Image (cartoon, helix red, strand yellow):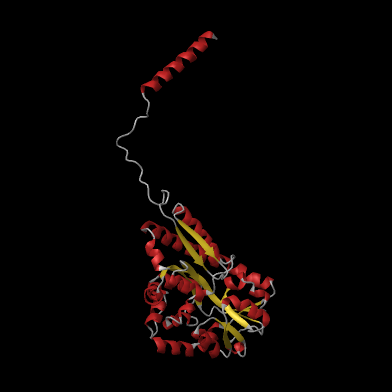
Amino acid sequence: MKRFLAIILAAAMVFALAACGSSTPAQDSSAAPAAETKADAAPEKTYTLKIAHVNSQSHPAHLALVKFKDMVESQTNGGVKVDIYDSSVLGGELEEIQQVIDGSLTAAMVMGMSNWQSMVPETAIEELPFMYPDVESARAAFDGAYGDYVKENWIEPTGLKVLCFWESGFRHFTNNVRPIYTPADMAGIKFRSAQSEIRVKMFEALGASATIINFSELYTALQQGTVDGQENPLSIITANGFYDVQKYLSLSGHFYSTALFIVNPDFWASLPAEYQEIIQAASEECRDYDRQLSSESEADMIQTCKDNGMEVNEIDAEAFKSAMDSVWALYTDKYGTDAVNLALTSSGQEPLA
């Protein structure tokens, strides 16, 4: 036992002497220190990105914005704080757009281009009925040359920056009068419309009437019978519980609505380039997540409408397309075919003759 203790004591003395001989660990002079980016370091200045939208918290765009918030705040190490204002708490979409333009709001997710028609009348052509045959072609148009055209020629000249195009989706008719199978079934039905001349013309061409009502007032208008019906993507129909105040859902897909992620350009210019890159990349990744959520939940959303008592049907798409010839002629005569053809070719279709 004594011999064992002596060995332990000797070993301890050796380690102690080694420690005295070198007070700091040896450095590899050939190894450069790790580079530190601003996003990794504690931020010298913080920024707040306030984003408003009109959707409920169960809408795919809101869920994707929550992911965007997490990504941006994490990747900037808190340098950019993201606040999300949902459910029209800062006003309707026209108010949100104006707030972003004047800088009282830094960003918004706007569900559709109809909101720009009063400022840029040519944007009406985006709502030409049955422009896109499927969601893939619509997404390709906005991710390609047509999306660039929309940003550079229509939206950004109004005093905004567009990060990218998210998704509102294909729009469908709901009403309390009758199922809609053919254009003749639209006759006499009072529909709510957004502030969009071309939508009003569409309803009139189909024998229906249109009343302009803010989205924030739509549920009450349906509930009280101010209007008989409305048209919106499935995500909005279900997230806002329109199945509680509507009997019939007709899957028309009469036009596709994009969603525009807009930012105040002065706020954008004030950000460090590194933060701009992080926000831009996050907006595009979360755009894909928004679209994924929309696609994956489509069947479930239709089932939700059925489970809540709605009668769901398909329409005679070819009959509706033929009924829209006059609307196409009116707007292509008014604004020409250049932008329309760019949308068609960007989505993999043939241009107009």
Farthest left residue? 30
Horizontally, residue 51 falls left or right of residue 21, namely right
Question: Who is closer to the viewer here, 14 or 3?
Answer: 14
Q: Position of residue 180 (x, y in %)?
A: 62, 84
Q: Residue at x 39, y 80 (%)?
A: 339
Q: Is residue 129 above or below residue 79?
A: below
Residue 293 in view = no
Question: Who is closer to the viewer here, 147 or 66?
Answer: 66
- Check the picture and name the quadrant holding the N terminus: top right
Q: Quadrant of residue 161?
A: bottom left
Q: Quadrant of residue 319?
A: bottom right
Q: Residue at x 45, y 63 (%)?
A: 283
Farthest top residue? 2
- Check the picture and name the quadrant holding the C terminus: bottom left
Q: Residue at x 60, y 77 (%)?
A: 217
Horizontally, residue 240 falls left or right of residue 83, namely right
Q: Is residue 277 above or below residue 29?
A: below
Question: Who is closer to the viewer here, 212 or 139?
Answer: 212
Residue 275 in view = yes
Q: Quadrant of residue 269?
A: bottom left
Horizontally, residue 268 falls left or right of residue 214, namely left
Q: Position of residue 299 (x, y in %)?
A: 60, 69
Q: Position of residue 345 (x, y in %)?
A: 39, 77
Badge count: 0
Q: Position of residue 251 (x, y in %)?
A: 59, 78
Q: Residue at x 38, y 56 (%)?
A: 274
